[in-house]
Image (tube, grey):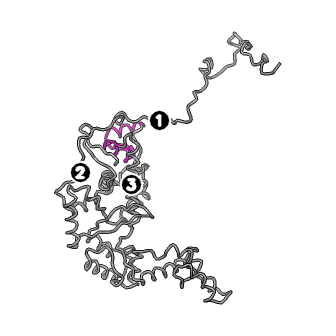
Amino acid sequence: MPLNFSAAHSSRITKPKSKVPSLRRATSSPFADHPRRKPIERSKTKPEEVPNDGLLQERLPDTGLVPALGSDRRGVIETVRHILESMFDEVPERGGMNSVRIAEVLNFRKSLPSIVQAVHVHALTGSPTTTEREIAKLVTAGSLRKLVVPGRSAGGSAVGDGLVLVDDWKQAVRGEPGLSEAVKENFVQILNRHPTAISLPHSELATADAAELMHAGFLTSSTPSWRSTDLFSRPGEASLGTLGSISTIGSKAASGTVDAVGGEDAFHGAGGGSGLRNYKIRAKEGERALSRGEEYLLSLPSTGPYLRLVTSARTHLMTLLSKSRYREAPVNLLRERWNGGIAGDDQASRRRKARGEFAGVLPGRTRKWKQFYGLRFDWVLEECLGAGLIEIFETGSVGRGVRAT
């Protein structure tokens, strides 16, 4: 008889239970006498869906698009100053940040250049044609300068052309401690002679002055000082990066010498090494690039951190908007998501906090202050609107709505 058909597996055999309460084992659980049930097995193929808000179960009503967020009576100069002044929120008094973090936030804000994206200006003005004409007149008059902001990587999308007030540009040059007084005045005179230029020819500056300005961040090279072929087919400084130069190395130097294998700079010229020697070699390459007659693109110090801040803020706002079902949400709801559900500063919130109830997180623990240093929601919304990433429309019931394009 097989074992699987033995009486041990039969459900008819049960153990006798004692009917005397005193003989039962004592237990501290009040649910000991309740029948046990197996846990419900959930499907592993389909994850649980987080229910959306009741307001976002259907599409928001659209009664018309909002073309601009500003006033038509404001000029370009006033708009640029308004964008620069309204970029960040003030540091809250009870924000959950210590003095070190507050100093980091303030120093980061101070180090950013006074650049305003042209698309941001268009988001606050009513007529794009009128705005472009006014920008062209201001650039020709020497009150405003354009700054080329290319893509940050190969194939990356550009943030857009930047606009800088000439007074702010000159103030940044004169306030740079790493430049000599002669270089400062010479560079300011060059900016005055070329009010509409976005680049400068090599004949305008001496090699030493150009290298000093590039080190300070006011100039960049229009073309890279190396090519991709240099990393694979350039054994020494005499080569121009062609494969044919490799076969001619042995005929130029004696066998067994350092020059026969490309010279002492062969390894460092291919991108290897670090430290002071690599820095000197790159400095030589920069001087050779300057002497080849390349143009210099105008720039401002700390442009890289500014671009990272703008691009990451745009991406984060689009991520918050994509959490809605139809990729659209009221402006108030999107603002609450951007701020991170921080605690209110009204009397009711203070009373709830005094009673020990949850009144929201501190501002210092939100991404708005950790990653974006207090960047204002309205500023990012205007930036995304000008870049064409979103549309703002009137709902007629819950105020304005935001929709991803």
Tell me where residue 195 appears, x and y as whole percent: 25, 75
Q: Quadrant of residue 2?
A: top right
**Callout 1: SS:** loop
Q: Which residue is mark 1?
A: 49
Q: Marks 1 and 3: in contact by CB < 8 Å? A: no
105 versus 276 height, above or below: above
Q: Earlier in the sequence, mark 3 or mark 1?
A: 1
Q: Earlier in the sequence, mark 3 or mark 2?
A: 2
> Quick one: 256 or 35, which is closer to the camera?
256
282 versus 3 height, above or below: below
Q: Which residue is mark 2?
A: 67
Q: Which residue is mark 3?
A: 313
- Tag of residue 4: none
Of all residues, the one furthest to the left in this rendering is: 73
* Foreground label between 3 and 1: 1
Tell me where residue 65 appears, x and y as whole percent: 24, 46
| Amino acid at circle 2 | Pro
Q: Residue at x 57, y 27 (%)?
A: 40
Q: Is residue 285 left or right of residue 91?
A: right
Q: Is residue 218 visible?
A: yes
Q: Is residue 345 magenta?
A: yes
Q: Distance between the Cα atoms at labels 3 and 1?
A: 27 Å
Q: Residue at x 42, y 74 (%)?
A: 223
> Quick one: 352 or 338, which is closer to the camera?
338
162 versus 9 height, above or below: below
Q: Residue at x 37, y 62 (%)?
A: 158
| Amino acid at circle 3 | Ala
Q: Which residues are magenta?
A: 328-357
**Callout 3: SS:** helix
